[in-house]
Each structure stands twice: as C-alpha cells, then as structure tokens.
Image (spheres, rainbow, N blue to C red):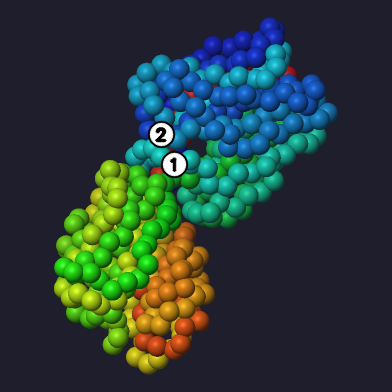
Amino acid sequence: MTITTAVRTGATNNGASASTTVACTLTGLTAGNFVVVGVGWVDTAGSTNVSSVTDSAGNTYTALTSKQRNSTQQYSVQLYGKAGVAGSGSTVTVTATISASVSFSDIKVEELSSTLGSWSGLTGLDSALVGGTGNSTALATSTGTPFRNNCALVTYGGANSGTITAGTGFTLRTTGANGLGLADLVQTTAASKAGLLTTSVSSQWTITAAFISEPVANYGSVSNTTGNFSGSGGTATVPVPSGIQANDILVIFLYREMNGQTVTCTGFSKPSNGASGFDEVAASNHSLYIGWKRATGSESGSFTINHDTNNQWDQPVCIRISGCITSGNPFDVISSSASGTNVQTTPVQAVTPTVENELLLFCGTSFNAGSWTPSGVTERFDNGDAITLGTLQVGTAAASGNKSATTTGAATRMIGWLAGMKSIAAAGASFDMKKASQFLEFF
C-alpha cells in the first residue's frame, strides 16, 4: 500500500461571523474518487446538527459516522463521504449546512483514489467507529475492526488548546494549528484499530473516525423458479435478479435430474475455464450445472436455459454478485464433488484463494427435497427443495476450511460445489490519499 499527498490551496476565516454554512473549494477533483469531508462546529444547546453536505458538482455526501460532541466544551465533529464523485478536473465547492447559525465551524476535505479505479456505486464505508471525547493530550476513538484487509482509516477531531499532530501510524493531511486535524492510515490487516490524534496541550477534545474500503465482492440478490418438469424444447427459465448493475457477476445453478446434458444460456460461460456453456458436476441420480456472465446492467425479464432432454425435473437459481473483477474470469479456485453413497450432508468442500478479499460461493444439491442447514457459509437461498446457495467473505489468501450443508430430506446422493470469486480489491491494491483542505477557524 502507498500513500502520496497532493496539497490543495484554500482560504481561511477566523469565524467571527455566525453562519449556517461552511465551505471548502477543491481544484482538480478527479471523478470516480472517494471524497471524505470532516465537519466541526460548536453546539451550545446539544441539538445543532449538520443538515446536509453537498457540492457544486451535484454530489451529495452521506454521514459516515454519528455526531460526536464534547459536552464540556460543546464542540462536535462528524465525517461524511461520497463514493464515485462527479466533477473531474473542475473546481468544486463543498458546502456543509448546519441546522442553526454557529459562530465557529470547520470543514476539511480529503480525496482518496485507488489503483483499482473508480469507486462508482460503492458506499465505501466498511465499519464505522463511534468516536470519543476526553480531556488530555491524546485523542482516541473507540476501536473498530474492519471487515477486510487494506482499508483506509480516516480520523478527524480537535482540541480546545494546542496544535494537533498525527497519532501513532497516522499521517496528518491538514494543518493542526487551528485545533483540528484530519489524518489517515491504511490498515493492511483486518485488525482492531482506533482513530488517533495528539494535541500539544492537555485540553478538552472530541474525535471521530471511519474505515473506508475499496470495492470487494459482495452478495447482491438471488432469483429462482419452482422446480418443475422441463417443457417442450428442453428449456428452463429463471428471472434476472433484482438490483442489477453493470459488471455484476450473474451465476446460474441448474439442478437437473439428468446427467451428461449440454446446457447453454446466451452469454453464459463455464466457471472452470471461461468457455461458452455450463460446467457439470454429476451424481448418479442428478447433475449440477453452473454458468456465469458479466452483466451489462441492461438485463431484464428472464434468462432462458437450453438443455438436451425434455420431461426431466429441473430447478434453476440465479445469484448476483457485485464487486468482482471487471474483466476476465472472476472465478479463482473451484472445488466440487458428488457423494458416492446415500447421505444427508453434501460432500465437504474447501479451497485456498490465491488473492485477498475473495467471496466464497457455495452450492449444495440433494435428490430428495428438504430444508437446508449450511455449515461455514451464510445461506442465501433455500426453498426447502433440491438446491441451496451460500456465501462467505474472506480477507486473506488462506485455506477456507470446510464448507457443507445438511438437508432434512431423506439420505440420497448429493453434490457440493465451492468457488473463490476475485474481488476488485485484491492483494496489491493501494490507496492514494490526497489532501484537499480549506477551513474556518474553530474553537
């Protein structure tokens, strides 16, 4: 991971005039980046809040943390953010609107870019930290644990006296001479961490922080049709999953009480090698067929699945995964097998991802209907029938451990299938933390 700094210039104001707004002007903003905004204000009554954070390029910023207020000195801080900002190369004014007129307020802005490209469509928030208040030279939030490796931890806060400097491991991105500072680090492992700053004089302080992550593979939605005998022409249909976006990965799993079929669906390929068609995992009494495609974002209605033989029981399920790599085969490692005897638990599957931040996708099938209980994954589909799906996000490129599922149906031949899906935020990704700060004097 690397961090570089690009200094932006900005005006200052001593906060002598009460106002409901505080603004910061950015130059050379890069579209698609993630912008973090720190807002600070004096909240005498305890009920003054930030009404909105917007900018002149049409971006609206979402609260990343809750308001943190020091009741003794009555000042508050909060972090806002926007993924995939608009306004490339332009001069953009970021404005925070406060619910009441205040005499002292502050805004600081940081632009985060990624070697992985655009943040478009991502909230970016990984795990919010509540923050903290106190009276000392050390400013510290409560600790938080990110969901995955390689997150940016951005922290913002101020003290009543002294000059703010970065806490251990952090880099200060703004001047701390006015009692406030915005700092960051890259948390390379998914371990607990607090947001940290330091002030040169022991005094009342307040601080907040948030983990922000690059795009990673996530479960999106699932669609299915009730199992049925295939109609004339040897076809089955399954609805397009909801919420589809460009570059989502769509995976169709087809339970079919027929082995050795040639299964196709327009645009779908084999996870094993990317060739057109569906992979097959065969048990003696049924087969599981798997195909995938990268969505254009315009898909609607249903997918039609073609296979060889009519009048055989089938059940298709389609799952949508977001945040995978945007080109090439998204499947990294695959494990699958069928049971050789009649059982109620699928054959155990395990894989070892080759890169970080993958999503494990699991499927189990049973010749006899029954409700499923997964082991090692979060269940995503179970209608008490022949097929179940589950997912699990993993942070490190290490052995997954055993994954399986058990059914209440009678013992029969079963299939287990497990794959690691490559995230955009894989190993070797890096953040580019860019400073862009204009502030009004605070305290």
Name the residue at 16% across, 62% down: 276
Dividing the picture into quarters, in which one does residue 31 lie? top left
Q: How far across and how far down the image is residue 248, in percent?
A: 33, 50
Q: Rounded to the nearest whole Å, what is the CA distance between mark 1 and mark 2? A: 7 Å
SS at circle 1 = loop
In the picture, measured across the screen, residue 201 lies left or right of residue 218, that is right
Residue bearing mark 1: 122
- Outermost residue, front side: 232
In the picture, measured across the screen, residue 331 lies left or right of residue 8, that is left
SS at circle 2 = loop
Q: How far across and how far down the image is residue 104, in percent?
A: 70, 16
Name the residue at 69% across, 9% down: 18
Query: Label 2 crowding class (10 Å Cα cut-off): few <14, some 14-19, many 20+?
Result: many
Q: Which mark is residue 84?
A: 2
- Contact (Cβ within 8 Å) of mark 1 with mark 2: yes
- Outermost residue, right side: 72
